[in-house]
């Protein structure tokens, strides 16, 4: 007789999405029974090793930071690029001052480590996360594949496992990754908004040199463009490095080379990567995949959720995959917990799912558009000219630097996750710096020369936007107009309040200084930069107008060529490249 497995939440997949979701469910609602079904046996290799700093917040809240830090993964402080209109190398730094201090490890999640990330060996990283979820009380069943999803309309009624067992749960979570097992079985379609169709080839190497070593364990990943694609170089430990090639599928088909032949050829042709692997040996674990960007038409149903790559995927040029996975898994867990509270009525449960979908759709689409922007701005990609024209056609404009920057923010430059102006986890001031590196003619700073600001809120609708904190989902006020959102809380709320009282910049900032000091919000040297980012985003999204009053001198908001965040690379490899 087949076993009947009864659980409260059934999660398909025990990778970072499943383990993070399960871990948060057990942390904040320990009475919930959570079971994860993983078709593979850990440890196992997996691509997607480069992180963004926001993941540190998730790991710390989940309680797994110390275990991850103890694994001694390289500390990612940013990336070095050969990309854009020049062959010169340039660096992107996570730390606002561009300085990574030499301090011992393992370290706590504090100080400079809150602004850095990891470069992780997924076989080790995923097992640490899964073990932590198990320690919190999750039941993880390895080597257990889901064979069938039973359904009644939009409701999942059970899972049939590979051994014939049946799973009965109240809520189901698809954390199966790119395969999207539940997504497909529930008939959820996908949108592929990018014209770009890339393939990826990669292997792991032993004893490759790091391009740069900074402090104790600090380094930058390397992203080197070729005439037809780009190479990633991601140190995973002192001895192990992930090296991959991404190129258009059509180029690979027309090259006449085998996947591994094209991969080896690319490494040989790129001088910086070639010098780093001259004494290294490949592990012969060569793997290929397509990495076409997509977003699911729906991300939640009557009793199910999608998390991580099951709900969407963006080209890896921005290293956003693990970030999208961890953040969506956390918000999924909080939404499930909130929906189970006795006071949650049907309308509240609908709002939870609507907010979950809205936020995660925005994130995925932002990263897809950001990736499109990066590719279109690189004239070395001679085979992507038609792709560039398609972007311009879809946007109804020619993609010169300034118009491309504005097209980038079609969905809005106000970032809920950062609480300030930005796009795809990058602040808007830094975004201008990146645009300068990608184009000979940098984008225009909308605030330049202005000194007075007027609110333009007419025609907006007030809604509630979700805030996810300590296992709860709270609704706070926001305005929405033409698909663009303005939070009326946090720093944006204070900026709206300040402008309503003081239209002139200096008076407004003085008011904000006092409010920030008394609000309990983070306050420091970076606050002025965040205020400028909010103003720029609000101008571009149409929430305020920037004027110049003759009663006051114009303000200078120009951005220098080099800043600590984005600067010309000064590293020198063994071969001087």
Image: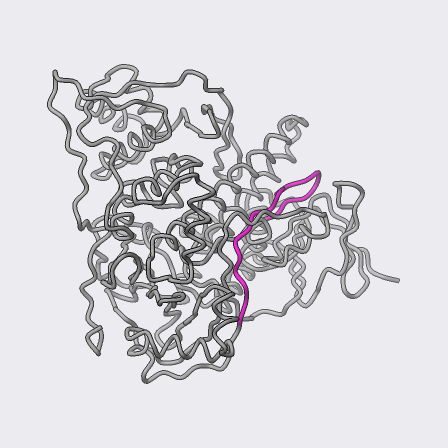
- Against 541, residue 317 (above or below) is below
Q: Can you give x and y, in whole percent of width and height, for residue 81 in the image?
A: 30, 61
Q: Residue 573's image quarter?
A: bottom left
Left or right relative to 188: residue 225: left
Q: Can you give x and y, in whole percent of width and height, for residue 154 in the image?
A: 74, 40
Q: Nearer the viewer, residue 281 or 61?
A: 281
Q: Quadrant of the N terminus?
A: bottom right
Residue drawn 48% across and 30% down? Answer: 483
| The residue stretch that appears in magenta | 288-306
The colour scheme of the drawn protein is one colour
- Against 234, residue 206 (above or below) is below
The verdict on residue 324 being magenta is no
The verdict on residue 292 being magenta is yes
Residue drawn 43% across and 39% down? Answer: 396
Q: Nearer the viewer, residue 571 or 295?
A: 295
Left or right relative to 370: residue 192: right
- Against 51, residue 481 (above or below) is above
Residue drawn 28% across and 73% down? Answer: 272
Q: How many callouts does the rendering have? A: 0
Residue drawn 51% across and 69% down? Answer: 123
Left or right relative to 130: residue 442: left
Q: Quadrant of the C terminus?
A: bottom left
Q: Nearer the viewer, residue 239 or 412?
A: 412
Q: Can you give x and y, in whole percent of width and height, for residue 20 in the image?
A: 54, 52
Task: Determine the residue located farthest toward the right in the rendered image.
Answer: 1
Q: Nearer the viewer, residue 393 or 44?
A: 393
């Amino acid at each position: 007789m087949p076993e009947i497995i009864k659980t409260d939440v059934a999660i398909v997949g025990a990778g970072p999405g499943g383990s993070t979701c399960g871990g948060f469910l057990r942390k904040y609602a320990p009475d919930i029974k959570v079971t994860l079904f993983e078709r593979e046996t850990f440890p196992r290799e997996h691509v997607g090793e480069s992180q963004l700093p926001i993941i540190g917040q998730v790991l710390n809240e989940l309680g797994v930071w110390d275990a991850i830090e103890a694994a001694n993964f390289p500390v990612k402080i940013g990336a070095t690029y050969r990309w854009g209109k020049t062959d010169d190398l340039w660096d992107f730094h996570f730390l606002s001052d561009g300085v990574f201090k030499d301090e011992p490890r393992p370290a706590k999640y504090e100080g400079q480590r809150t602004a850095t990330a990891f470069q992780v060996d997924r076989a080790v990283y995923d097992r640490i996360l899964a073990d932590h979820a198990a320690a919190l009380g999750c039941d993880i069943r390895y080597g257990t594949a889901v064979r069938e999803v039973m359904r009644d309309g939009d409701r999942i009624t059970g899972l049939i496992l590979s051994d014939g067992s049946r799973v009965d749960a109240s809520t189901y979570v698809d954390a199966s990754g790119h395969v999207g097992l539940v997504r497909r079985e529930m008939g959820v379609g996908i949108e592929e908004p990018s014209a770009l169709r890339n393939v990826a080839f990669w292997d792991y190497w032993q004893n490759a040199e790091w391009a740069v070593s900074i402090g104790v364990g600090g380094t930058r990943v390397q992203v080197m463009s070729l005439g037809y694609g780009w190479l990633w170089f991601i140190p995973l430990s002192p001895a192990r490095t992930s090296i991959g090639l991404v190129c258009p599928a059509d180029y690979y088909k027309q090259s006449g080379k085998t996947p591994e032949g094209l991969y080896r050829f690319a490494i040989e042709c790129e001088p910086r990567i070639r010098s780093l692997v001259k004494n290294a040996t490949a592990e012969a674990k060569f793997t290929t995949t397509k990495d076409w960007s997509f977003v699911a038409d729906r991300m939640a149903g009557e009793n199910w959720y999608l998390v991580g790559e099951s709900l969407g995927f963006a080209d890896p040029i921005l290293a956003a995959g693990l970030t999208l996975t961890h953040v969506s898994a956390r918000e999924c867990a909080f939404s499930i917990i909130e929906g189970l509270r006795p006071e949650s009525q049907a309308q509240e449960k609908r709002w939870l799912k609507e907010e979950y979908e809205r936020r995660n759709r925005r994130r995925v689409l932002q990263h897809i558009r950001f990736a499109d922007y990066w590719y279109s701005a690189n004239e070395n990609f001679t085979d992507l000219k038609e792709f560039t024209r398609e972007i311009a056609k879809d946007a109804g404009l020619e993609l010169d630097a300034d118009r491309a920057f504005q097209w980038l923010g079609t969905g809005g430059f106000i970032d809920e996750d950062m609480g300030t102006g930005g796009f795809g986890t990058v602040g808007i001031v830094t975004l201008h710096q990146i645009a300068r590196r990608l184009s000979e003619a940098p984008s225009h700073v909308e605030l330049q020369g202005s000194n007075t600001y007027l609110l333009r809120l007419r025609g907006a609708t007030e809604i509630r936007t979700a805030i996810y904190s300590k296992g709860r989902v709270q609704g706070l006020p926001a305005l929405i107009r033409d698909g663009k959102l303005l939070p009326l809380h946090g720093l944006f709320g204070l900026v709206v309040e300040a402008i309503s009282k003081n239209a002139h910049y200096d008076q407004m900032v003085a008011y904000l200084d006092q409010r920030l000091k008394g609000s309990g919000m983070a306050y420091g040297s970076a606050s002025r930069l965040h205020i400028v980012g909010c103003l720029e985003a609000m101008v571009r999204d149409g929430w305020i107008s920037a004027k110049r009053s003759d009663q006051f001198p114009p303000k200078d908001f120009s951005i220098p060529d080099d800043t600590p965040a984005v600067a010309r690379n000064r590293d020198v490899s063994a071969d001087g490249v």
